[in-house]
Image (cartoon, helix red, strand yellow):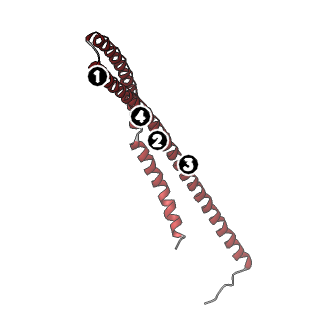
């Protein structure tokens, strides 16, 4: 059996071809990583936008609830103050105080009505937000991710061959 000596040029050619193949693999790997980065960035932006929208509405709901609570507290304080005055007053002053109670109650009811109207709007806004969240077609998104995985899996398996 005779051995054939390998020339320096043949070694250089094989080495150059190997380097070209590695360069090609690295380019493909870079493209895959860029695609992953883009998908991750878009997903992060969507999550941030949804979080901002939800938290903004929660803050508004808290303000409306505080306004309603303040109105109810004021009404309770007014009723307590008027009760104390009724004990001290005569009947003539009692009639005047009752008129004041009615006025204050009407104002309080108006404030409560406004707060409830604001709560209704906030509930509508929250409903709109939920409709937007529900309008996201997660099935299509999952299918797209699965298709991307199906495309990238053979490439990933191919690169795993070189890790051994």
Q: Which quadrant does the N terminus fall into?
A: bottom right
What residue appears at the point 45 percent right and 35 percent down from the top-left corner?
A: 59
Q: Is residue 89 left or right of residue 16?
A: left
Q: CA distance from mark 2 to mark 4?
A: 16 Å
Q: Which mark is residue 38?
A: 3
Picture quadrant where residue 97 is located: top left
- Using the image, determine if residue 151 lies above or below residue 99: below
Name which of mark 2 and mark 4 comes first in the sequence.
2
Tell me which numbered mark, 2 or 1, is placed earlier along the sequence.
2
Q: Are marks 3 and 4 in contact (CB under 8 Å)?
A: no
What is the distance, in whole Å, between disc 3 and disc 4 at their CAs? 36 Å
Q: Position of residue 141 (x, y in %)?
A: 43, 44
x, y percent for residue 2: 63, 89
Q: CA distance from mark 3 to mark 2?
A: 20 Å
Q: Nearer the viewer, residue 62 or 149?
A: 62
> Which label belongs to residue 83?
1
Tell me: residue 7, above or below residue 2.
Answer: above
Q: What's the distance in space between the residues labelled 2 and 1, CA to CA?
A: 47 Å
Q: Choose mark 3 or mark 2, whichever is in front.
A: 2
Instruction: Find residue 51 and name its label.
Output: 2
As drawn, 41 above or below 97: below
Q: Say which of 82 and 152 sits in front.
A: 82
Q: Do the CB atoms of the residues marked 2 and 1 lie less than 8 Å apart?
A: no
Who's the residue at 66% across and 65% down the image?
Answer: 20
Residue 58, how many percent across, how many down?
42, 36
Is 149 left or right of 7, judged from the image as shown?
A: left
**Most foreground residue, 96 or 90:** 90
Q: Nearer the viewer, mark 1 or mark 3?
A: 1
Q: Quadrant of residue 90?
A: top left
């Amino acid at each position: 059996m005779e051995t054939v000596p390998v020339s320096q040029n043949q070694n250089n050619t094989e080495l150059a071809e190997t380097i070209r193949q590695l360069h090609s693999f690295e380019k493909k790997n870079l493209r895959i990583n860029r695609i992953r980065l883009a998908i991750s960035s878009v997903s992060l932006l969507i999550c941030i936008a949804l979080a901002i929208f939800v938290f903004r509405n929660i803050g508004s709901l808290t303000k409306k609830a505080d306004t309603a609570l303040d109105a109810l507290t004021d009404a309770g304080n007014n009723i307590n103050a008027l009760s104390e005055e009724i004990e001290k007053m005569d009947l003539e002053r009692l009639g005047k105080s009752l008129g004041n109670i009615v006025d204050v109650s009407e104002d309080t009811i108006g404030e409560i009505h406004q707060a409830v109207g604001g709560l209704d709007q906030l509930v509508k806004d929250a409903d709109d937000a939920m409709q937007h969240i529900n309008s996201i077609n997660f099935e299509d998104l999952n299918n797209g991710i699965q298709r991307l995985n199906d495309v990238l899996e053979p490439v990933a398996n191919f690169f795993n061959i070189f890790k051994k």
